[in-house]
Image: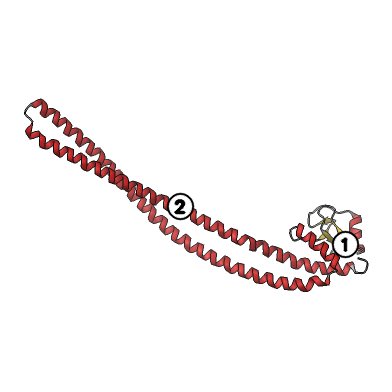
Amino acid sequence: MATVSIKEQTGYLIELQTIDTQIYNLNKRLFAIPIELENKNREFEVKKSGLKALEEKNKELLLKKKGEELELAAKEGVITKLQSQLFSIKTNKEYTVMLKEIDGAKADKSLIEDQILGILEALDNIAAEVNKEKNSLTEEEKKLNKDKAGLEIERKTIEEEIAVLNHKRSQAAPKIDRRILATYERILKNKDGLALVKVVNNACQGCFMNVTHQTVNEIRMYDKLVTCQACARILYEENE
């Protein structure tokens, strides 16, 4: 360590940390892109499921309508049969009973017709909702595809920027003493891409904890690398 200039090495470390900070931030965004894309796809699928639910409800109502129509046809058959039997009845009592049966069947028929009307109204409402949802989904799909294209362009741009920065890093890293570089990279890996930080107003800019006057004096002496007692990052002071 004594054979190298700590002051000079600190300058090289500052250059390297500037590059590594950019690489770290770009990689962080690069990692977030597929997650963002997955979230957008999931949101779109949720919206599609709303349309599917409406379409399923529409199928259920159509089946119910068909069932009611079959029941209505059966009830009309009963009424027709009872009415035809009126002509063969011989007593007033039987005639009265038959009329009551016919009236009861007609009341049932009226109820079924009301139910069918209710179903038809519900079907009209669902048809309007389905149409509205389809139009909305068409717009959402256009937006999703646009977002996907934008994210793909961003991903490629970031990868190109990282490639350029990695080239710069490959030129900057060899300037640093092997042992110092190993220490720096170990801290870099463990501290979210931030191994070297300034001391400003006696505070570490990595963890924002105060550092002692002795620590500040050690930094200024440039005899060795000085690390923060709280976060273990390498400390430096910006030259005025």
Q: Residue at x 93, y 69 (%)?
A: 3
- Packing grade of label 2 (10 A; few <14, some 14-19, many >=20) is few
**Relative to 116, does residue 30 appear above or below in the rendering?**
below
Q: Amino acid at mark 1?
A: Leu
Give left or right: position of 59 versus 114. right
As displayed, is residue 168 above or below residue 65?
Answer: below
Q: Are marks 1 and 2 in contact (CB under 8 Å)?
A: no
Q: CA distance from mark 1 to mark 2?
A: 59 Å
In depth, the one of 79 and 13 nearer the eye is 79
Q: Position of residue 182 (x, y in %)?
A: 82, 64
Q: Which of 91 and 44 lies nearest the eye of the viewer?
A: 91
Q: In the rendered image, which residue does mark 1 sit on?
A: 225
Q: State which quadrant residue 106 falls in.
A: top left
Above or below 167: residue 21? above
Horizontal side, residue 105 vs residue 143: left or right: left
Q: Image point 47% across, 64% down: which residue?
A: 142
* Mark 1 crowdedness (10 Å alpha carbons): few <14, some 14-19, many ≥20: many
- Looking at the image, which residue is at 33% across and 49% down? 123
Q: Which residue is mark 2?
A: 49
Q: Quadrant of residue 138?
A: bottom left
User: Mark 2 is on which residue type?
Assistant: Ser
Q: Is residue 183 left or right of residue 48?
A: right
- The x, y position of residue 60, in whole percent, is 35, 46
Q: Which mark is residue 201?
A: none
